[in-house]
Image: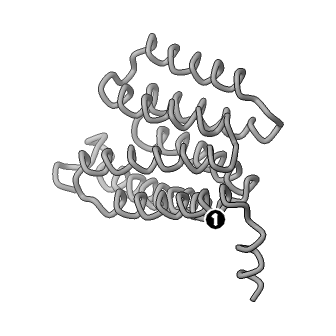
Amino acid sequence: MGSTLMLASLSPMELAGQLVSLTALVLCLIAFASKQDQRLMVWLLAANVAFALQFALFQSWTASVLTLIVILRIILARRYPGNLWLLGVILALNMAGAWVTWQSWHDLFALLAGTLGTLGMFLLRGIPMRLMLGAAALCWMTSNILIGSVGATLAEGLVLVTNAITIWRLHRLKQQYPDLGHPPAGS
């Protein structure tokens, strides 16, 4: 009965936002279930399109614009890791996007998420990158909590848990193979 009342109190835009956020959650689950990096990236790009749309439906414009920039960042950082010029361009786009759309202090979390994710993806690899991306996911989760997005909050929680497990696995492999600096092929 309580959840029915909650759903009835949502505007049509907020209800659509909840449905799109649940779609983003499903896309994240499919992405993280993939064993192929290329498929993972395609599904994550699709999930970010859904995240951008759900933020727009909740009228969280800064988060929506910065999520669109995340899509560009994923493509560029994967193709041009360590490129400081592109890093600067993406950071400038984040700042410009936030400046144009800023509504309240809530937008700070989207800006922090975009900035941390950009720095992590362009400058770091391995565990340090995942720690930075984990901090970004925590900021995105906070942003989703503040707007009341159920599916996107769960999706970011999934990202945090998956990321933590991967960090733990990488740490264990590093302990098992300290002389190699990286795990043997196929691990």
Foreground of the two, 140 or 15 = 15
Q: Estimate the x, y position of residue 40 in percent, counting from the top left.
A: 31, 51
Q: How is the image coloured?
A: one colour
Depth order, front residue of 72/186: 72
For the point 39% across and 16% down, which residue is it? 83
Q: In percent of the image, x 51 and y 34: which residue is there? A: 68
Name, please, the residue furthest toward the top. Answer: 85
- According to the image, label 1 marks what residue? 150
Horizontally, residue 179 falls left or right of residue 133, namely: left
Q: Is residue 12 above or below residue 51?
A: below
Label 1 secondary element: helix
Q: Quadrant of the N terminus?
A: bottom right
Q: Residue furthest front?
A: 12
Give the camera-side residue of 44 and 139: 44
Which of 94/103 is in front? 103
Question: Which quarter shows the C terminus?
Answer: bottom left
Q: Residue at x 66, y 45 (%)?
A: 139
